[in-house]
Amino acid sequence: MKKELLKRTLRLLDLPEDMDPQVPRITILGREKMLAENVAAIRRCTEHEVVLLTGSGTLTVGGEGLLVKELGESRALLTGRLERWAYGE
Amino acid sequence: MGNKKKWQFCNGYVIIQIEGVYPERLATLLKGAGVPLWDLHRLEAGGLVCTLPARDFRRLRRLNHRCRCRVHILKKGGAPFRLKALWRRRVLILGMALTLLAVTWCSHRIWFVEVQGCRRMDQGVLLEALREQGICPGRDVRKLPLSDLADLVAARYEELAFVELHVDGIFLRVRAREALAEGERLDLTVPCDLVSTREGIVTKISAYGGRAQVKVGDKVKKGQLLIAGHVTARDGSMTYTTHAYGEVLAAVLYKAQVEAPETQVEWAETGQESPYGALYIGPWKVFERACPFADGELAEAQEILSLSPWPARVCRGTWREKVKRERPLTPAQRKEAALFEAERMALLQVPRQAKIIMIDRYTVERDGRLYGVCKLTTEENIGYTKEIT
């Protein structure tokens, strides 16, 4: 209900949807860098898999030699060889 | 090293290993508390390794109570830890700080003065003139109006047409352009005459262009034609104008007459004394006890303490009060004083390039007054070019 209200307000004010702090924004640069913003928590971190918790569910990133280069207040910068990524519940 | 790495190094960092059932939870708590983490990765053995700012390490210990993880410090790095290790060697730190200060202090001053463009003029004279304006090695000249001071120095010497001062690091580059001498100003293609600048008796004449109008032994007046630019062919068939030039030397007389003084002003000590003290750092006077008398002279100033190897010196001495007194002169002293002053006044009239060939000094009495007279005879080039209009 709260999420829906926020979405409607943003639409009404003609603001982009990524203003919503619950919506994750993911930027991938090549196959070696991924910047995930609006990240709530880190669930798992291994060399082959990093699981992040976002407002849209868990974000699973798979690959080789993964490293969380930077973990800030709401963003995570992942480096390594990215092979796949997927949302889960 | 990137900017982020530099900041990380300056602020200090700690590399930690988190062990426990769920180390990611501690990482999330840290993230939520606003503690940035870098290079987060899992070890094969099972621990989670990450880097965090040194100042946030204490917060980690508080948050860890909720996770029950074990935290090991793998490495402490960055400037704060290195400085802490150095802190025991205080003399070294003091030396480094003083060296840094000295280098900073020295780099704001000029230490070398390079003069370019002085051919006829003595470089020493130019450097002395600059020194009088406060421009010398060891001074911070960046705040001085260099352009104005350069103009002032250039205006002081007639040999100089232009002076430019340019500070380049610890070098002061002085570029001087000398003024052209009389007779050099006109181009050789311009028709002109050579005329006399002073009254005198011609001792030598060499006409390289034009026709000589005077001969050795002739008495010439100021402005008189010496070498004419108007030339008529020997057979009188044609007349043309040319650039007259040559060397005309003449014996020129300079005379000065000064009345002999009745008295002489001299400084006499009253016997009053006051202590003097001064502190020097390098060539600069940091403190000086001022003279308490209206007129005083510093006597017996000597260095009493030198803080070697630091460039600090302490000097002590005595101020002695002096007053002006007029002393009547004997006839012989009056004569000598008049002759000395007359010679000085005559010498002041002589141009720099003139060669003094005779000095005649004598005294005369006129209307009951005694005068000192000095006559100087010089040999000098009296010709200068004057364009034919």
Image: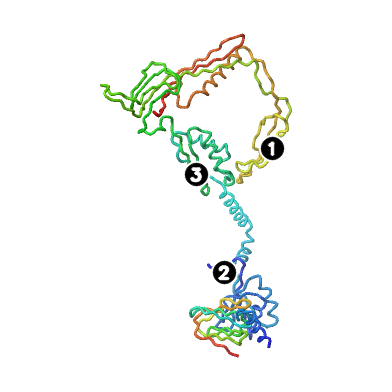
The answer as to whether the residues below labels 1 and 3 share one chain is: yes
The image shows residue A67 at horizontal and vertical percentages of: 54, 79
* Chain containing the residue with disc 2: B
The quarter of the displayed image where residue B357 is located = top left
Q: Residues within 10 Å of mark 1 (few under 14, many from 20)?
A: some
Please tell me whether residue B12 is drawn above or below residue B207 in the rendered image.
below
Number of labelled discs? 3
The image shows residue B150 at horizontal and vertical percentages of: 53, 40
Asked if disc 2 and disc 3 are in contact, CB closer than 8 Å, the reply is no
Please tell me whether residue A49 is drawn above or below residue B147 in the rendered image.
below
Residue, disc 2:
B4
Residue, disc 1:
B277
Q: Is residue A10 in view?
A: yes
Whether residue B160 sits left or right of residue B267 in the image: it is left
Residue, disc 3:
B173
The image shows residue B125 at horizontal and vertical percentages of: 51, 34
Color theme of the render:
rainbow
The amino acid pointed to by label 2 is Lys
The amino acid pointed to by label 1 is Gly
Q: Residues within 10 Å of mark 3 (few under 14, many from 20)?
A: some
